[in-house]
Image (spheres, rainbow, N blue to C red):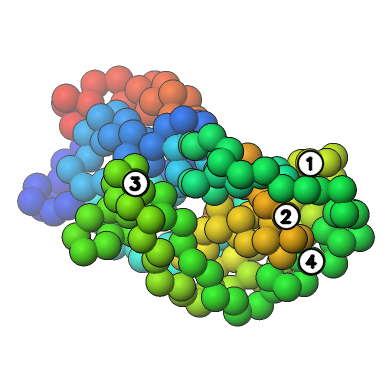
Amino acid sequence: MTDNPNPNARPKGEIILINKPYGWTSFQAVKKIRYVTRAKKVGHAGTLDPLASGLLIICTEQQTKGIQAIQDAEKEYEGTITLGATTPSYDMETEPNRQFPTAHITEELIQNTTAQFLGAIEQIPPLFSAIKVDGKRAYTLARQGDATVLKSRTIHIYSFEITSIDMPNVDFRVKCSKGTYIRSLANDFGNALQSGAYLSRLVRTKIGEHSLNDAVLPQDFETAWKSKNPHPEAQ
């Protein structure tokens, strides 16, 4: 235990790169880090849906001051769009509710259609999202059967690359601005193909200069932290 010249000063804190597991909420990951580190102030720089995995940046103590700058950075995702059907949530949280033809969809059409989504575009967020509508979360309204349409917003798609096609599944990599909903991109992509589509897999691989390659699973972070801090109560 080292001497602290100012015992009332807030600890410097850390920027922690977590590989959020599939099925976890971002809040669960924050809760785990708070429990492990005993930090008084903990926050994340950009929510990941429970059905998405990948890079989640968690900041503690004074490092939470930099959360906004991290959130503003460019994001990169890899995932899979499944063609020929739609779901109310635009992903696999809900069951398919409509089926569409795909016989007319060629690999060339898929590749060419990506160009429609490059640059500054208007995007309507999915109703199954955390956006507030009259003080209520949109996903709460959606689960109550409310079909409210959210307002569109301008987002930027810097690159949209198709990496593999195995119908009806299309693998992709996209670089985009903050505020982009990849679920909405999948739904809009299906519409542009005169069919339907939903997001069946999503992994966030980068936020600004931070990469998933440098991230650790929550349980691995806990193991490493405990090995370095065997007596946290003495700190």
Q: Which mark is on residue 145?
A: 3
Local crowd size for mark 3, using a 10 Å CA cut-off: few (<14), some (14–19), many (≥20): few
Give the label, 2 or 1, closer to the camera: 2
Q: Which mark is on residue 168?
A: 1
Give the label, 3 or 4, closer to the camera: 3
Residue holding disc 4: 113
Secondary structure at numbered mark 3: loop
Residue in the image at 22% along x and 55% along y: 136
Residue in the image at 42% along x and 32% along y: 24
Residue 44 visible in image: no
For residue 133, above or below residue 57: below
Residue 84 visible in image: yes
Secondary structure at numbered mark 4: helix
Spatial separation of the CA atoms under disc 4 and disc 2: 12 Å
Spatial separation of the CA atoms under disc 2 and disc 1: 11 Å
> Mark 1: which amino acid?
Pro
